[in-house]
Amino acid sequence: MDPLASAGNICTVLAALGLLASALVLSFDARLTQSRIRARLATAATLVAVQDLPLTVVAITDPSRSGFSHRITAGHLVTILIVLAVLSDGARRDEPPRLNPMLAGLLLGSVALGGRLAVLADPTPFLTVGHPVDVAVLVAITVLVAAAVLQVLRSPLPRWAALRVSGAMFVLFAARLGATAAEATSPPPAVIVGVVACSALLATTVTSLLLSTLLATRSREATLLLRATAAEATVQHDREVVHELRSATAGIVAGVQLLAGGRVPPGPRRRALEQMVGTETARMGRAFDQDEPEELTRLCVDDVVEPLVVAQEALGHPVAWHRSGHHVVTRHDALSEVLRVLLDNARRHGHGQRTTVTARPVGDTIELRVSDSGPGIEPHLHDRIFHWGVRGTSSHGQGIGLQRAHRLMLELGGSLDHDRNAAQWGGATFVVTLPAAERGTVATGPATLIAPVRRSGPRSPSAAAEVG
């Protein structure tokens, strides 16, 4: 066999295999993008490869029929009609494909192969430019190819991809049309170049399409992840707010019940309860109304702690505390929420035992320690106690309060820590650390004046009776 013919036939076989590989990539891409036109291109590529491979084998085994690998026959009219119908369907309709593209190409390719095999019995199956009928068939095939190219150009494919795919189709057809016009008995160099160029151009195009799809998919996943993260943060914030309102409302309700029930006679204790209810109610209102956090200001620790102690005692939770006179730089509502979380946890887990709150200066900071007499923090939770949703095995909480309190302290420029060393004496001790306010500094916002109530040591029977 002529070496050039052998090379041409080998290139045709490799090109057909390349078409199948391109069809496989397009099928995967079509599944990712749910693109009908990409699925139809995969079908068309499979169709052409399926009907070209057997005929190329015929050309290799029978030199007298070598033209089947590079010339146009009347059977190509059936092939191009099917290809045009497939591409037209993909360009017109936007819904995702239902049938496997390569399976559809295999079935349609078998039909086209049957049409081309029908001309094997014809001793002169190839079209020539010397017969008017053959010329008419060539013109018809040319028109159909041009229509198929236009369908690709007008398809939803990216413009660059549509130009490259239509260019590959034009190069392949032009090469075969030239070989047919020349009535070449073996694949001419132009046909070999055209077949290789078509296969390479299509392969690089579908690979680029798949890469762009994967990049777009990763970008969409990143966007969805950001949205999911933002939604999760919003849900967590809402749950934190609900958690805080529910816990703070319990103290307010208990105080209101004591006041309304007449169980607290007029005097300092009743005034303290009234101020606690007013202070906590105002704080809850600000939690809804404020879009921006309040400014850092100079606050007296006692003014923040006292309403919380009164609220805890209204709930039947004794708290040992005495006024210290220390001042810190913080936000009133945020520090109040942090301490309320710690006191609520101590009330739930302390089983009615007394909780101690102390304040002391440590360097240029003020350290507030909240110690209870409960079971303490389980050892395996020491490193995760401030994580969202973490709670002890015996806890009925949601694992929200400590996480929010820890975050608020970081926002305040302070810290919230669990003192593991204090655990050896039983219970749990949490340490709130805030910058100490310099002496003589003036608060940037109005101060809330609360009548002092000392809480150092056991309450007297009369005080216990007042709280109920």
Image (tube, grey):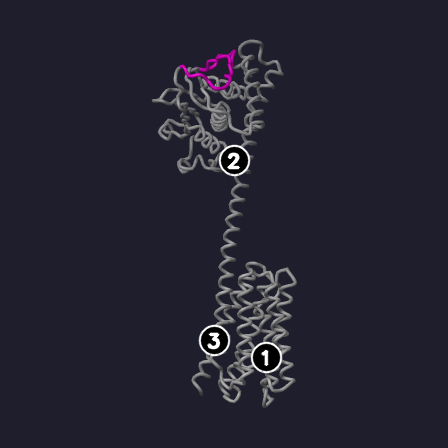
| Image x and y of residue 429, in percent | 41, 27
Residues at marks 3 and 1 touching, judged by CB atoms closer than 8 Å: no
Q: Which residue position is annotated with label 1?
A: 113
Residues at marks 2 and 1 touching, judged by CB atoms closer than 8 Å: no
Q: Is residue 91 above or below residue 459?
A: below
| Outermost bottom residue | 123
Q: Secondary structure at mark 2?
A: loop
Q: Secondary structure at mark 3?
A: helix
Residue at (55, 12) in percent of width and height: 271
Q: Amino acid at mark 3?
A: Val
- Examine the rendering and report whether any part of residue 55 can be seen: no
Q: Quadrant of the C terminus?
A: top right
Q: Is residue 275 above or below residue 75?
A: above
Q: Which residue position is annotated with label 2?
A: 398
Comes first in the chain, label 2 or label 1 = 1
Please tell me whether residue 142 belongs to the stretch shown in magenta: no
Residue 154 occupies quadrant: bottom right
Q: In the image, 351: left or right of 88?
A: left
Comes first in the chain, label 2 or label 3 = 3
Distance from disc 2 to disc 3, alpha carbons, whole Å, reads: 71 Å
Q: Secondary structure at mark 1?
A: helix
Distance from disc 3 to disc 1, alpha carbons, whole Å, reads: 24 Å
Q: Which residue position is annotated with label 3?
A: 193
- Examine the rendering and report whether any part of residue 290 can be seen: yes
Front residue of 416/460: it is 416
Extent of the magenta region: 440-463
